[in-house]
Amino acid sequence: MNVLVLNCGSSSLKFAVIDPDTSLERVSGIAQRLGSAEATLDVKRNGNRSSEPLPGARHEVALRAIVSLLGEMGLLERLLGVGHRVVHGGSTFSGSMEITPEVIAKIEECIALGPLHNPPNLVGIKIAHELFPGMLQVGVFDTAFHQTMPPVAYTYPVPLEWREDLHVRRYGFHGTSHRFVARAALTLAGLPAGDHAIVTAHLGNGCSCTAVRNGKSVDTTMGLTPLEGVMMGTRSGSVDPAIIGHVSQALSKPPGEILDMLNKRSGLLGVSGLSNDMRTVEEAAANGHERARLALELFCYVLAKAIAALVVPLGRLDALAFTGGIGENSSTVRAKTVQHLGFLGLELDEEANKVHGRGTAGQITKKTRPQALVVATNEELMIASDTAEIARRNGHAAR
Ligand code: ADP
């Protein structure tokens, strides 16, 4: 039994075929630079990678190419459904949902909140409906896990009309990853399912941290949009909002352009002046590049402050779980961050910290309570599992 997982972005389409029962990934890949002459379909199967040019292809052509590949591999047989990553589910979705015309209408209503992400997500849903008529389609929302946050965590202290009429509140993102990682950390740390306090730190190109109390998100760093919170690859994270007015006036540029720079030209890239890639920043910092050093220090300092703040809603800390490309691979970022948090009782085990990385999950501190851990995230598996769960609940069989 297989589930096709799709993550449709503005110029890319990530896919994976996963057996949710065995967690086995049969094939995965990404169609990228869609709409340009350089578009490609990159595929990973049985540990081997290949790439084919798809010049000028848009999402539909790319998905047709993916479906024909799956057909050749015999993976369209016993397909249970298609699971779609959907970024913004607003306050409407608190869990994964079978996609019906009503659900599509609600995702469309959330476009105002996720103008960059929801439209391409909807394109993926529409094309999948055309290519797999009658097959189960499931939407898995980045925001859903955070719908358990209490009002003190999701309310911004802003005028009532903004909150009521414009739905201005904290939504939070990366929910599928935080949910997966909190569960894995619970097992790894041997914590009781009904009584635990975990902070998950998802550090990829986008970065966010979440406080998880007994399996539920109680607070998170990202907000109305993924711009808020800790420092990221190209996003600033939280800054004084008055900076927008100040810079807009000083440069005679519209506020939207300044916001774009906070999203695309800030973070590691803005501070280092070199790159949004942590590997490049770390290497340059090690070679004495001053701005890269500041970028690395600032990243870990801001991250540690955010993690410490998330202990407030938890009341205590049992485990801190690092995940995502940086969290899983950068022993330097983990070491610096844990060292800032010594006052919480975290004590780095330098050897263990060096050993653990992508693929090898485990503890990186000396004491077991509280402990810091590395956990490899797997959002695709979570989407496949949710799709299988909904198939069982709603009586859909594989075809
Ligand atoms: P995305 O958020 O797009 O899924 P990833 O989770 O793959 O991205 O994370 C990308 C980030 O991980 C980049 O900043 C990259 O530099 C960082 N990264 C990957 N490998 C390493 C490594 N060995 N050391 C430090 N950073 C790494």
Image (spheres, helix red, strand yellow):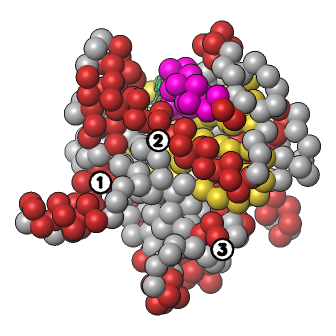
Tell me the element at label 1.
helix
Q: CA distance from mark 2 to mark 3?
A: 24 Å
Residue at 52%, 25% (x, y): give it: 336
Counting residues from the start of the chain, the first of labels 1 and 3 encountered is: 3
Q: Is residue 185 above or below residue 235?
A: above
| Ligand 1 neighbours mark 3 (CB distance < 8 Å) | no
Q: Position of residue 150 (x, y in %)?
A: 70, 70
Q: Give the SS element for disc 2.
A: helix
Residue occupying the far front of the picture: 343
What's under tag 2, amino acid-wise?
A: Val
Residue at 35%, 49% in the rendered image: 236
Which residue is denoted by mark 1 in the rendering? 262
Specify the amino acid type for callout 1. Leu
Depth-wise, is mark 1 or mark 3 nearer the camera?
A: 3
Label 1, ligand 1: CB separation under 8 Å: no
Q: Residue at x 22, y 33 (%)?
A: 273
Residue tagged 2? 302
Q: Is residue 184 left or right of residue 140?
A: right
> Is there any visible trace of residue 359 in the rendered image?
yes
Q: Earlier in the sequence, mark 2 or mark 1?
A: 1
Q: Tell me if mark 2 has few (under 14), some (14-19) or many (20+) residues whose alpha carbon lies within 10 angstroms of its own.
A: some
The residue indicated by pointer 3 is 151
Q: Quadrant of residue 190?
A: top right
Q: Camera-side residue: 330 or 86?
A: 330
